[in-house]
Amino acid sequence: MSRFWRLIPAGLLACLPLVSWADAAADRLARGKYLMDTVVACGNCHVQRGPQGEPLFERGLSGGFKFDLPPFTAYAANITPDVETGIGRWTDAQLTRAIREGLRPDGSLIGPPMPIEFYRHLSDADVAALVAYMRAQPPVANAVPKSVYRMPLPPSYGPPVKQVVAPPAKDQRRYGEYLVQIAHCMECHTPRDEKGQLVMSRLGAGGESFKGPWGVSVSRNLTPDPSGLKDWTDAQIAKTIRTGMRPDGQALKPPMGFGFYSQISDTDMAAIIVYLRSLKPQRPQKP
């Protein structure tokens, strides 16, 4: 044993692994909270809402929000640890599979608007952090109606997800792409075909309509086209994402989750903007 280790009391030495584990668990929970409250913004769909669409934060992530679109009428699931109506009986592995592969423990497929195509990119560390955060929430009983799909669902969203590692933050474009993927921005800001499938060749072109208690909102073109973000400064893009106020003073409508995006870190926001500016410019096909 080295002289350094001999200087540490035996009782303290025995506690070191426990301290390390506790620190790692605390870091994981903090990361999960950050992702949940900002970039991934699960609460934008899964927080229960009132009759005017107002978020009922005291009801937590207990779901029930209705998405009524031509291809489907879907309801956000209860993702609190309630054992009867939520995820209380699910294992960590089952939760991870549901988030990244869209498969429930019974083998059934989770349909849109759950953005599985984008959540498949969640790193192992980040999905573990999200699962830890969901586990730490108070259970809320809320039975959610079953979603109805008027479009064919795929047999799967792809092969089982293997190991995923997030790009380094110093690679701004790649890290920004990762953040935009797990933030599922393109789930709303990419046009869909008549079967409800995303038209990936028109990534970020916007033009999709969303009906709700707020009326009808139309997703914006996020590409560096003159009809999109070309003439916007970085500061204007960041402010709009965080506050929901456009440079012309017009307020954005839901389902844009600006209430969650307000706390995105400066480092993450800068990477997101770098990625958006790298997209292929697209002209909108809808007004």
Image (cartoon, helix red, strand yellow):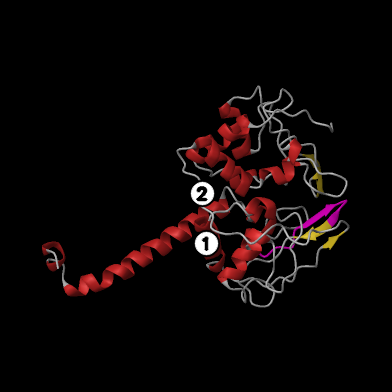
Residue for badge 1: 128
Give the x, y percent position of residue 95.
Answer: 61, 67
**x 79%, y 40%: residue:** 191
Magenta stretch containing residue 66, yes or no?
yes
Q: Which mark is residue 166?
A: 2
230 to 87, vertically: above or below: above
Q: Which mark is residue 220?
A: none
Name the residue nearer the viewer: 199 or 8.
199
258 to 281, vertically: above or below: below
Quadrant position of residue 180: top right
Give the x, y percent position of residue 59.
Answer: 65, 64
Whichever of callouts 2 and 1 sits on the residue coming sooner in the sequence is 1
Q: Quadrant of the C terminus?
A: top right
**x 56%, y 32%: residue:** 274
Q: Which residues are magenta?
A: 62-72
Quadrant position of residue 7: bottom left
> Circle 2 — which element?
loop
**x 62%, y 63%: residue:** 60
Q: Amino acid at mark 1?
A: Ala
Give the x, y percent position of residue 46.
Answer: 68, 59
Magenta stretch containing residue 73, yes or no?
no
Give the x, y percent position of residue 25.
Answer: 42, 64
Q: Amino acid at mark 2?
A: Ala
As drawn, is 219 to the left or to the right of 125? Answer: right
Q: Is residue 11 visible?
A: yes
Name the residue nearer the viewer: 273 or 245.
273
> Circle 1 — which element?
helix
Mark 2 and mark 1: span between their CA atoms?
13 Å
